[in-house]
Amino acid sequence: MSAHLTERSVDHVVLERAEVASSWTGRWDSLRLLTPNWLNRLPGYRYAGADPDGYMTMPQVTEYVRGFAAVVSAPVRPHSEVVAVRTFRDGFLVRTADEEWLARTVVIASGPYNRPEIPEIAAAVPSQVASVTPAEYRNPTQLADGGVLVVGAAATGVQIAEEVQRSGRPVTLSVGSHVRAPRTYRGMDIMWWLDTAGILDEGYQEVDDLVRARNVASFQLLGSTDRRTVDLNALQGMGIRIVGRLAGITGDGTAQFSGSLANVCMLADLKLTRMLDAVDAWARSRGIDAEVDPVHRPAPTAVPPDAPLALSLRSGEIKTVLWATGYRSDYPWLDIPVLDAKGHVRHDGGATPVPGLYLVGAPFLRRRKSTLIDGAGDDARALAVHLVSYLDERARVT
């Protein structure tokens, strides 16, 4: 957003509570981006290294974003944590711990992943079992020896489950709604297909159910150097036990799992088939079938017929519960009534109901790729045009 505002000669400041790209630090040690390096495009800024098909580590992401901030001369004020934003006269009053700013417009760019989303049933985990969130997890050595129950099977859940299993700690993976995706398909990274076929560019006004689209789980992907696919079949092949969605924990410490595991997996397989059908149809329509590998489809998810519906958390088998249940946005500093019942900012493609207040970086803000690094620039460009029009109209009226 700063790059596009600078391009349009809009005076602005970027308030950052820590340092540029600090949100990419403090992740677990082995984490890599799920998008290949060539796809991490920013306005006028591209990956220029020797491994375009690789996946950045978190220190590399931090360096990349900081490099972009320097190139565009973003007017960042680090260590300026915002403590309050409210309307004031015909604009906004923004308070940090040390300063006050008056602004005609405000852009919320704090991201949707501010706090781990921990279900209320976590309070019922017996005291002898540790509860850990992905924000706290760094590597398996910090976990007690013994079994680990990983709750959640989106990207974070499957990545951590695989790593913990390899450490010798037996993993039980509680599976809810998830989205299957092969790391590579017909010889190309799945993200290449989604980008080239235009699927990532699908607009928010083009989908039938925008609420569902904005809440869909992340792909079961791993940014590994060997580009391996990590799905439920692969995890079971290495000894991980899969069970249904965690439905509750009883007073005696028994974890209860949903019996709908087969249906959930069948639905994920169906969505995968639809996605790959769309990819194949696009390849045929462009006449590139002969230029890529032949069609191949991942095997359907193998659902164990004896998946347990209950597991005692007091037996000693499980030493840790890791809550890979997602994150939620958090705006304790926003004193403007634009939040819905779930705490999300209400908006239409990034423009909130309050004139002059904008949002960037939210899931499917304007495009399916909005939460990817590559999606930030396009969304910000459109909102910058809207913001400049708003300022021009205000100036005309004044």
Image: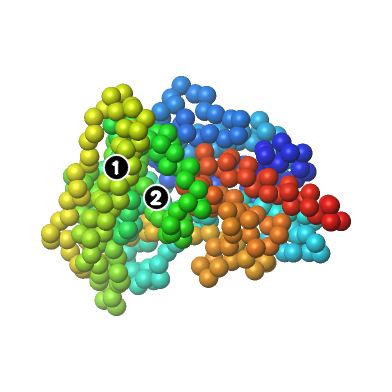
Residue at the far top in the pictured view: 50
Q: Amino acid at mark 2?
A: Ser
Which residue is nearer to you in this view: 293 or 157? 293
Q: Quadrant of the N terminus?
A: top right
* Residue identifier under label 2: 218
Residue at the far bottom in the pictured view: 251
Vertically, is 228 above or below 356?
above
Q: For residue 84, say whether it is visible.
A: no
Q: Residue at x 62, y 66 (%)?
A: 338
Q: Residue at x 30, y 37 (%)?
A: 280
Which residue is nearer to you in this view: 366 or 144? 366
From the viewer's perspective, is 293 left or right of 388? Answer: left
Which residue is nearer to you in this view: 181 or 30? 181
Q: Quadrant of the C terminus?
A: bottom right
- From the image, state whether disc 2 or disc 1 is nearer to you: 1
Q: Secondary structure at mark 1?
A: helix
From the viewer's perspective, is 298 left or right of 141? Answer: left
Which residue is nearer to you in this view: 363 or 330? 363
